[in-house]
Image (cartoon, rainbow, N blue to C red):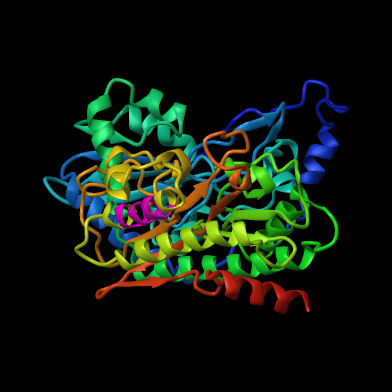
Amino acid sequence: MTEPTEPIKYRKNGLTRGVTEELAENMKQGWADTERHGLEPIAQAPYAERRRAALSAAFPGELLVVPAGNPKVRANDTDYPFRPSSDYAYLTGDHSQDGVLVLEPTGESGHRAVLYLRGRSRTDNGEFWLDGHGELWDGRRDSLAESGQLLGLACRDVRTVHADLAAADGPVRVLRGHDAGVEKALRDKGTAGRDTEFEAVLSGLRLVKDAWEIAELRFACAATARGFEDVVRVLATDAETSERLIEGTFFLRARIEGNDVGYSTIAAAGPHATTLHWVRNTGRARPGDLLLLDAGVETNQLYTADVTRTLPVSGRFTDIQRKVYDAVYAAQEAGIAAVRPGADFRDFHRAAQRELAEHLTSWGLFGDLTADKVYELGLHRRFTLAGTGHMLGLDVHDCAHSRVEEHVDGPLKAGMVLTVEPGIYFQENDLTVPQEYRGIGVRIEDDLLVTEDGSENLSADLPRRSDEVEAWLAGLRG
């Protein structure tokens, strides 16, 4: 069968235009066959197969389409680093741009899984060296046969996917928002309501992690702990340290041990720590400041840790810093204690927030009101602001589109992974609190695996208690 072709694209203002017949002929010849044979499936392949089976069972008789997504332009002809849609990666183990997973119904039940991918660049038409995304520019890709062996999936050329989808009959569901071309090919076949339900089911399948995913998250947390140690070693005790140096130091660890950071690193020093998502990182950590570092390594298979520690830059907390820090630690302890199978998902949040309300009330911040009343009215939220945690996995805020009754309104189950991250944030310009509190922000965050009889702290390599944090800082700095 003749492979589909696409025209070679040249830069509008490139220095060369076209090639001589002699050069074109020369470039077709003399290339060794690099096809690999007898490849073993990747470790994720059997897990991905079971995940696809679960999805198949949820939608018998329907065509299911899950795209990886397309590259996104950063500037002109420069793209952002590509990351596939999380559901695509979950179901295939593949990370290729433009890929499309199609589950073709085999009758009233069951599906045939087909993965549409871009295979090797062709040499007979110059694609491999003339096209801006040819292999001499972007690197070698796996052939369709190689991908099939590695992923345990039937693979087809992605350049046929739009025609194949346009010709499909019967009910169709597609994961939207990732591939406009796929959605256009299916424009007369799907409905927004059906696709929203499809997205919710896909997201819900990821709520409980399998053994392979848990191993990935363990590694992500261990690598993240090493990244925090790297930061401590560059954090000066007698001079300013750039927040961007802190960010860059952690990023180096993420790239050495994984794919990237799982989200934009928060390296928030001094009053910046009171901004929950301070990712500008344009300030400086000074002796006497607290540094709130919220960062996570994303593994090569795209699972991320999400850990926060609040560190005294000088090595020791001041009295007021310790007071606030210890209150947050107590709240986190209460939240962690509430993480167990069968508990309501919101229980850990309620326990942590109740503890924070007690401390804030005891400091006289709400006049004559009792802690019970403060909690009932939600007044403590002026200083706690956010929820106490979220699901974690392929996304830092994982399973965000799952059904509410399975997620925040549902019970915790063994195999779920979530963060517990209470915080207190006293804004620098908040006149309702004494001056000594203003500009102090503290968050402590860990990644909890729900086990059969309780929970396991996957990020326990990093100390949490204030005296342990001080000893850890001193030990790393020598």
Question: On the rendered structure, is 308 left or right of 396?
Answer: right
In the figure, 248 relative to 171: above or below? below
Check if residue 452 falls in the magenta segment. Answer: no
If the image is split into quadrants, where does the C terminus sit? bottom right
Q: Is residue 33 visible?
A: no
Which is nearer the eye, 124 or 332?
332
Q: Left of 221 or right of it: where is 375?
A: left
Report x, y in % for residue 244. 75, 48
Question: Horizontal and vertical percent for residue 325?
Answer: 54, 60
- Can residue 339 be seen from the camera position used here? yes
Of residue 29 and residue 224, the one placed in the foreground of this image is 224
| Closer to us: 196 or 71 | 196
Boundaries of the magenta span: 350-359
Looking at the rendering, which quadrant does residue 163 occupy?
top left
User: What secondary structure is the stretch in magenta mostly built from?
Assistant: helix
In the image, residue 341 above or below residue 161: below
Q: Is residue 282 above or below residue 317?
A: above
In this view, the residue in front, 254 or 287, is 287
Q: Position of residue 216 (x, y in %)?
A: 47, 67
